[in-house]
Amino acid sequence: MPVMELDVASRTPKVVRNPEASRARILDAARIEFVTHGLSGGRVDRIAEQSGVNKNLIYHYFGSKDALYLAVLERIYADLRARQQDQDLRGLPPIEGMKRLVSNTFDHFVATPDLIRLMSIENIHYAEHLKSSGSTKALYSGLLDTIRILLKRGQEEGVFRANVDAVDLYLSISGLAYFFLSNQHTLSWLLDRDLAARWRVLKRRQHVVEMVLSYLTQASPVEAGGVDPQ
Amino acid sequence: MPVMELDVASRTPKVVRNPEASRARILDAARIEFVTHGLSGGRVDRIAEQSGVNKNLIYHYFGSKDALYLAVLERIYADLRARQQDQDLRGLPPIEGMKRLVSNTFDHFVATPDLIRLMSIENIHYAEHLKSSGSTKALYSGLLDTIRILLKRGQEEGVFRANVDAVDLYLSISGLAYFFLSNQHTLSWLLDRDLAARWRVLKRRQHVVEMVLSYLTQASPVEAGGVDPQ
DNA sequence: ACTATATTACTAACTAGTTAGTTAATACAG
DNA sequence: CTGTATTAACTAACTAGTTAGTAATATAGT
């Protein structure tokens, strides 16, 4: 009658089962896979292989390829929300606060290329997964509030122009950074410049801050009318 | 010995052969397919079905799925070049010329959503197809020249600021329109606004023109330094 | 007859998802 | 604390359907 509880195997803390870790490894591998190849190009078999887990375990935990993709999407949006530290900008002088808001947004985009690629991928798929997500909504409310607070104070102090829509401003701040980063590959080729070079990224950052601040600090539009659409 | 050349089938002017038309129909169907589903999500069988042509004819004309995709990409870039009518802007007063350049760019993006989606798709694939293309290079040289000419005249007349990089300005003009359009689906959901609504597009157009012109017409940056990267 | 054009039928490889089970952890009665 | 029932973690092998690409063959125009 062998004494089981004292043999080597049972004392060795070799973790054969570890649901938390398995789930996390699947999710990490899935993020890399979908970010690299897109949703349609992403392969479940490759995710299984890379996470060192049997394919069916993926279905055990996540149900389907689409559900796994959604989990990846939700996690990266949750990370975004967690990292958005814009509350402390509300107390700053408006110009300084807005400068920091613009450069923080830019820096965050630069730091997380996965976010940009997933946003592009999700838009290629008409945001159908995001729309079927319970979370993720109300992601921007905090950021938009910060923008509104800074705008209002700047207008009261007379340093910002009137009639600025917070959403419009947010779209501009993001767009100025996003396009440069999301379309880096085509643009670098077509413009014959390595847009990923560090000095160019920093130069771009400066340009974006200046453009947004110029807009905000200019009293009134050059000419009210603009150009008629054709 | 039957007389074949006088039967109904041969007298009917049913155009069985029309290589030009077949090629064009394949290309049209392929554009719709790739724009709708992406490259990995696009199906050759569906392209054959939609163009009313046998699948192998596609391989006869284009060789492979990737080559067909590249043909679609090259055509949409060729259309872009053909439609870029910015030469006539060079003679306008700088402010007026620049206003029109910004709104033309915006309008062109709005008018050709296929272009935006294909640009996104190509960037998801790291621009690998574009890079293997003989044509398409030097696409922006004309547009950049127009920007440089208007910038220079504006600076000489004292209405535009100094030290503006033409490429930086181009990236901003495009980015301000592109992000709003390319990420319409996620943004409309997250911001709870229908960004595709006509009045919002027009409002956005106005905002973009104002932002670019504010930047150009402001004499000097609010403060030279900007914000240090973290 | 000959060639470009077109089609039918086919295949090898792939791919999301399933089946049918084994093994480890945990709860729980005695 | 020990044996047993139950649940959860995990796996190998497979299936049904898809997909890019091809080979053999037909037909029309000249």
Image (tube, coloured by chain):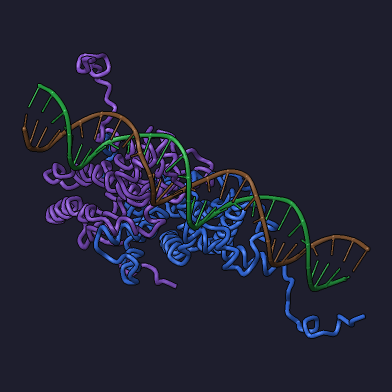
Chain colours: A purple, B blue, C brown, D green
Residue B175 seen in the figure:
yes
Q: Residue A18, how many percent across, how many down?
A: 26, 31
The residue located at (16%, 53%) in the rendering is A145
Q: How many marks?
A: 0
Q: Is residue B97 visible?
A: no
Quadrant placement of the C terminus of chain B: top left
* In this view, B49 is above or below A87: below
The image shows residue B41 at horizontal and vertical percentages of 48, 55
Q: Nearer the viewer, residue B124 or B10?
A: B10
Quadrant containing the N terminus of chain B in the rendered view: bottom right
Quadrant in which residue B110 is drawn = bottom left
Q: Residue at x 39, y 40 (%)?
A: A55
The image shows residue A33, relative to residue B87, as above or below, that is above
Q: In this rendered view, identify the residue nearer to me: A142 or B15.
A: B15
The answer to whether residue A220 is left or right of residue B179 is left
Give the image quarter of residue B44. Answer: bottom right
What residue appears at the point 33 percent right and 44 percent down from the top-left corner?
Answer: A115
Residue at x 41%, y 41% (from the top left corner): A33
Looking at the image, residue A196 sits to the left or right of residue B57; the answer is left
Residue B211, given in percent of the width and then of the height, sits at 33, 56
Question: Residue C26 appears at what percent x and percent y?
Answer: 15, 34
Q: Foreground: B102 or A224?
A: B102
